[in-house]
Amino acid sequence: MSGLRYVYAVCRPFGTPLPRQLTGVGGVPPKQLVHHGLVAVVGQVPEEDFAEQPLRAHLEDLDWLGTTARAHQNVIDALTVVTSPLPLRLATVFRDDSGVRAMIEQREETFLRTLDRLDGRVEWGVKVYSESTETSGEPEASVDTGARPAPSPGKTGSGRDYLRQRRNQRKESEEKWERAEQFSRRLHESLSGYAEDTRIHAPQNAALSRAPGRNILNAAYLVPRAESEAFVELVDRTKDDAPGLRVELTGPWAAYSFSGEDA
Amino acid sequence: MTVVERREVALVDLLDRLLAGGVVITGDLTLRIADVDLVRIDLNALISSVNENVPAPWEEML
């Protein structure tokens, strides 16, 4: 079986060889396919995993998706060390090398334009979480659910207390939410000053991220490598003036969030 | 670049980029991930960034 071609990224030719032990999807070392002055970084993948039907099935398997995503990122990471790659979306698969070459020819101008725009830039991810200090659940959940003849006179008072308590709680969490939003807006504004471009991703769901607290800001910043140290320092400094909030920095990434033509 | 020490990248950060970012190529290929129906593993619900129509809640206030 000949196998399909999995394309990780398109780059300008880079002088430095990739690490010899580098492997990508399926444990296969990626190779460079040079065409029209561009390099497609390509790995061979088996049809039984990457043809349309099996791929469709695999993509519904979070474990498979995770393994494949990490293998993909492994190659992109190595490329980011030696060049500024234009990463392709996960699982971009062609039938053979000539399919890859045809794709390069077709999109040559766009690739060159985007590679120029991304040259010497990296992506940083910044997330803000509000720490979950909320008392979860009901303030005084009644354990006693058994039949009770008639509510005692005192019940009315406790009902009112309960409502007041709930109201106060709601007010508190609204204020907290507002503070968190204000902080995130200010942070985003000051970080944008260092960035050539920004993207706001939707907040991450705690069920998947397993990160404590609620994700308020999930943003990506395109920053020149030369400015990256200043950018990271700025993020570090803001961490201290955010009581009850958590700021997380990820990167440097290849410019995944800025690879579109509309960017 | 060694500005920060590298930690294990969280899968969700990775998927934010690999499923919502990167160049989407149409043409002579077997499958576009954009066409894949991820609903069955509830990935759409989990990774809301896959659906770009969902804005960050605070973005409206900018």
Image: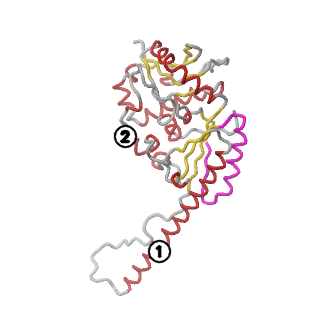
**Which quadrant is the N terminus of chain A positioned in?**
top left
Quarter location, residue A150: bottom left
Is residue A39 toward the left or the right of residue B31 in the image? right
Chain where mark 1 sits: A
Is residue B8 toward the left or the right of residue A92 in the image? right
Q: Position of residue A126 (x, y in %)?
A: 60, 45
Q: How is the image coloured?
A: secondary structure
Type of amino acid under label 2: Ile
Residue at 46% in and 76% down? A164
Badge 2 element:
helix
Q: Nearer the viewer, residue A27 or A106?
A: A106
Residue B41 has which mark? 2
Q: Reply yes or no: does residue A236 show up in magenta.
A: yes
Crowd tier of the residue under label 1, counting other residues whose Cα lies within 10 Å: few below 14, some 14–19, many 20 or above: few
Crowd tier of the residue under label 2, counting other residues whose Cα lies within 10 Å: few below 14, some 14–19, many 20 or above: few
Q: Reply yes or no: does residue B10 show up in magenta.
A: no
Magenta residue span: A223-249
Q: Nearer the viewer, residue A178 or A65?
A: A178
Quarter location, residue A57: top left
**Which quadrant is the C terminus of chain A positioned in?**
top right
- Would you name the residue on which mark 1 appears? A165
Q: Position of residue A184 (x, y in %)?
A: 59, 53
Do labels 1 and 2 touch, CB within 8 Å?
A: no
What type of secondary structure mainly makes up the magenta span? helix
Badge 1 element:
helix
Relative to A168, is A99 above or below? above
